[in-house]
Image (cartoon, rainbow, N blue to C red):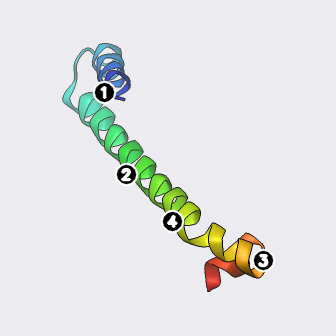
Amino acid sequence: MKKLIFLGLVIAASADGGSVPGVLGAVVLGLLFFVLVITLSLVAKLTKDFVVPIMYLRGATIRPAWSE
């Protein structure tokens, strides 16, 4: 993950000749990607720990299990 962000910074810096907006854009993009990964991981964890047992007990699909 760190290598991917570093690679994005290097590409942004070299494409614009090292301009500040290019590097800041890469940093913001990296932070947005990080937030997306954390959010999706949280949803996956909640689904596995709480929704799947409800689905099993009730014989329901994922949508009704999430609403319980």
The residue that disc 3 covers is 60
From the viewer's perspective, is 7 left or right of 59? left
- Secondary structure under tag 3 reads loop
* Picture layout, residue 26 above or below residue 17: below
**Which residue appears at 77% of the width and 72% of the height?**
61
- Under mark 1, the amino acid is Lys
Using the image as rendered, state which of residue 51 and residue 29 is in the foreground: 51
Which callout, 4 or 1, points to the residue nearer the camera? 4
- Secondary structure under tag 4 reads helix
Picture quadrant of residue 10:
top left
- Dot 3 crowding, Cα within 10 Å, few <14, some 14–19, many 20+: some
- The alpha-carbon separation of the residues under discs 1 and 2 comes to 14 Å
The residue that disc 2 covers is 35
Q: Does the CB distance between marks 4 and 1 fall below 8 Å? A: no
From the viewer's perspective, is 67 left or right of 42? right
Q: Does the CB distance between marks 2 and 3 fall below 8 Å? A: no
